[in-house]
Amino acid sequence: MIAEAALEALQAGLSPIPIAPDGSKKPAGSWKRFMTEAASEALVRTWFEADGDRGLAIVCGYGNVECLDFDDRATFDAFRERAAKWGIGELLARIADGYCEHSPNGAHLFYRCSEIAGNTKLARKPKAPGQAAKALIETRGERGYVITAPSGGKVHESGKPYVLERGGFGSIVEILPEERAELWALARSFDEETKARAVTQARRAEMRVAQKGDRPGDEFNARASWEEILVGWRFLYTDASGESYWCRPGKKRGVSATTNYAGSGLLYVFSTSTDFEAGRGYSKFSAFALLEHGDDYKAAAKALQERGYGARTSKPVPVDLSKIRVAKSEKKAPSSTSFPEELFDVPGMVGVMLRWIRETSVKSQPILALGAVLAALGTAVGQRARTEDDVRSNLYVIGLAASGMGKDRARKAMIELFDRAGIREATIPYQGMASDAGLRNSLSDYPVQLIATDELGKML
């Protein structure tokens, strides 16, 4: 049975190779030469008639054959369901009628195309800590091979066989390059790993924009709709998760981008035929800046401000500090033993954070805690407020105490609080800098940030 299938593949213009029956899914011998030439009929008979337990694999790339490999059946079922919504259900059905099989865990679709590539991961699932991202959908093309039916359980570690569902080697269909592009775009819409990374990168970029004072963009993100930004794009539908699907201008079917993946509110583009960079996340403001102002954020922010965005916060409120005076008798700073206790009774957020640090510290150091809180909240203020000359709040606090006195608790507490609030990445992006170059690079990327470092003397 396995020999007959291998000969059928050979007659269909494919390059079959044997797979070792040891669960490794590796070829039984060298197979590189069969990437560019098929084995003879005699050699194929020798391979498979001699050992009926060997598995059968098809070398991809040879004969312009490519395979779409699904890691699990649930993803394959969702792929077929989404294809119907995207308007390419007939294309997928035509490919499946030509050749569709179930692997032990997932599925394989074979097709021929004049344009093929090497093995490509199209959709992955975000990795767990310490683990590599899991491939959900990938292709097998040049320099790749796929184990196929009727390979038995000895070939796969699960012990399950490969089962042909429809078609066969002789009926693999040929599709156009543009149809292949639609198929790949559909597969990439399942790419959770890249989408999640795009969301993180876009939020980081937006935080840098906010730090530069482009608040009209913040308000534009909150008020504008994607319909008024994506002029000429066609809205298709919104799924149960709240993610919406769009078709680019000039395209009659398929999906080119989505908005609001995982509730992010961002635009994520699959197509490489638009002004947007494929695989990157765009906020409404960054999309507006690209489409209307050539990706010039400053020009976009200025244009939005002229349209009324951010007008309420465009100018700082002046504060008169001229009446503040310090008496000569007060110029000497109080010692740690005489620091007035009432100064720790601070209202608002400063007081809340200060009390929490004191209550959760093994050795309470209220002066160090107060300094850490003021530095942290000073950073937050500096990200949102500035003078007309672009001067922001900068507060430097150095905590000095003997070893074992608990001086590091306040620093770690600030990191923990910002982490819990979900703003650590934008506010405390780097730790452990050990040189002036590291400090300069950090401030170049994040002009306003909390640098909560221990043992400052090492860097000095």
Image (tube, rainbow, N blue to C red):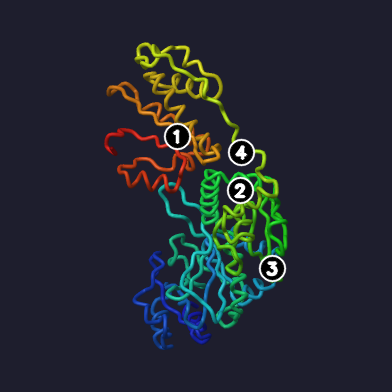
Q: Mark 3 points at which residue?
A: 249
The relative height of residue 386 versus residue 80 in the rendered view (above or below) is above
Q: Name the residue under label 4.
A: 315
Residue under the point 46% across and 31% down: 376
- Left or right, 345 with respect to 397, comes to right
Give the mark toward the camera: 4 or 2: 4
Q: Nearer the viewer, residue 381 or 175?
A: 381
Q: Which of 79 and 164 is in front in this view?
A: 79
How far separated are the C-alphas under marks 4 and 1? Answer: 19 Å
Residue 25 in percent (x, y) is at 41, 67
User: In terms of sequence position, does the residue under pointer 4 or pointer 2 come before the other?
Assistant: 2
Type of the residue with mark 4: Lys
Give the mark toward the camera: 2 or 3: 3
Residue 134 in percent (x, y) is at 48, 56
How far separated are the C-alphas under marks 4 and 2? Answer: 29 Å
Question: Are the two marked residues, 3 and 4, in contact with CB atoms closer than 8 angstroms?
Answer: no
Give the mark toward the camera: 4 or 1: 4
Q: Mark 2 points at which residue?
A: 264
Quadrant in which the C terminus is drawn: top left
How far separated are the C-alphas under marks 3 and 4? Answer: 40 Å
How far separated are the C-alphas under marks 1 and 2? Answer: 31 Å
Rate crowding at label 2 as few (under 14), some (14 to 19) or many (20 or more) other CA atoms within 10 Å.
some
The relative height of residue 111 versus residue 107 in the rendered view (above or below) is below
